[in-house]
Image (cartoon, grey):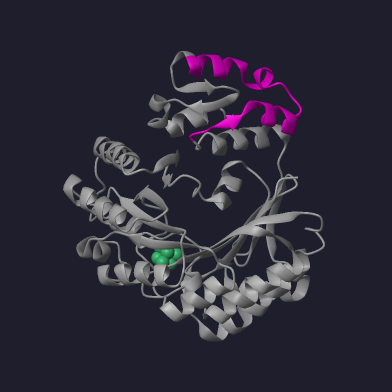
Amino acid sequence: MDPIGLYIHIPYCLHKCGYCDFNSHPENAAEREVYVPTLIDEIRHYAPRLQGRRVGTIFFGGGTPTTLPAGDQIRILKACKRHFEVMDDAEITTEANPSTVETENLKCLRAAGINRLSVGVQSFDADELKALDRVHSVEEIHQTVERARTAGFDNLSLDLMFALPGQTRERWQDNLEQAIAKNPEHLSTYNLTIEPGTAFHKLHEAGQLTLPEDDFQLELYQYTIERLQQAGYDHYEISNFARPGRESRHNIIYWENGDTLGLGAGASSYLDGVRFKNFNTPAHYIDRVKTDGHAVQTEETLDARRAMGETLMLGLRLKRGVSIPKFERRFDVPFSRVYGPVLERLLKQDLILMQGDRLALSPRGLFLADSVILEFIE
Ligand code: SF4
């Protein structure tokens, strides 16, 4: 069986960014004191269910996991290693925001086995950071990267956002150059989207925030691909770039629609064909784990057709695409019997291509990815 990915949600942030629709809540020291042991209880709860399964990746996400004292993250990691079969070479990532990390903390996390750091940079431009409602400065980004390297992190990912209101091509180019100059092993670049329920959504509705036109967004995206490839990064997923061998193994499990267990408030899981999700608010999550040992709020078993559609939807995000033989083994059905007509049509339109026995988006399909992928979903 393929190794599973473990996701651990730390829901606290110093401040809610205007665009954020993640499950993040203001820092709360008293609640945190209870949240961490609750997570460990939840880990203990799932130990029997994961018996015989190897854990290949662990990802601390949020929120901002580094709002926790390093000792708390280490306690959680130790509990994972005690109760689950974590592989010796597991990829163990923590997200970190500039302004929440000191060198000593990072050294402790690195010594405890966290071997990958994903830094939420978003922008190297002070005005853009302000417009995005981020609490950190450009200087703190530089410090964070320096501290991470000093602490021994040799697998560093930087998150950047483009297509911000009023962003010019030159400003985005400058952001990219600054990111490249940091020589990270991995880069994620996402265009800003306006999500319902966020502060940005209200501004957008009121006509006070305008995103760039689609054509301009596409131009920035195309430029990003060209420039990062030129700088030696492989464009291995729609929004992600990596030095050879430094792809996010954790996210690849998601994109391959593999088994994942999510722990913590609001975390989602996909295990043995069942998708389930925890209660969102930390207080609710804590209560439920206390009474039931877990905090699952919703659960659904995917039928084969839906699981196939999701496997394609996620797998086509990867440049290497989807292995047809693996797909057929997994679902025990010939691919062409299910998707023959749509396959033929998209191949004719040069939106997808076969690379050996793998199905992938074509260069043309990449820029129309959302609509191409939808063709496989009923
Ligand atoms: S730091 Fe990240 S998770 Fe926290 S509010 Fe900002 S965008 Fe959301």
Residue 165 within the magenta-colored segment of the rendering: no
Quadrant containing ligand 1 reads bottom left
How many marks on residues? 0
The secondary structure making up most of the magenta span is helix
| Residue 329 coordinates in the image, percent (x, y) | 74, 30
Q: In which quadrant of the rendered view does residue 131 lie?
A: bottom left
Q: Where residue 120 sits: x, y (%)? A: 39, 62
Is residue 278 found left or right of 26 in the rendered image? right
Location of residue 83 (image quadrant): bottom right
Q: Is residue 260 above or below residue 199?
A: above
- Image quarter where the C terminus lies is top right
Observer-nearest of 301 and 203: 301
Residue 237 visible to the viewer: no
Q: In this view, does 81 lie above or below 305?
A: below
Residue at the location (73% across, 67% down)?
294
Q: What stretch is highlighted in magenta?
A: 319-347
Residue 185 appears in the rendering: yes
Q: Is residue 57 left or right of residue 245?
A: right
Q: Where is residue 201 in the image (x, y as percent from the top left)?
A: 35, 56
Whether residue 266 is situated above or below residue 377 in the rendered picture: below
**Residue at 37% across, 49% down:** 189
Q: Nearer the viewer, residue 241 or 238?
A: 241
- State the residue in front, 235 or 72: 235
Residue that protrudes farthest toward the bottom in the picture: 30
Quadrant of the snapshot with the N terminus: top right
Residue displayed at 64% across by 73% down = 76
Residue 320 magenta-drawn?
yes
Q: Is residue 263 left or right of residue 227?
A: right
**Residue 193, position as x, y percentages in the image:** 36, 49
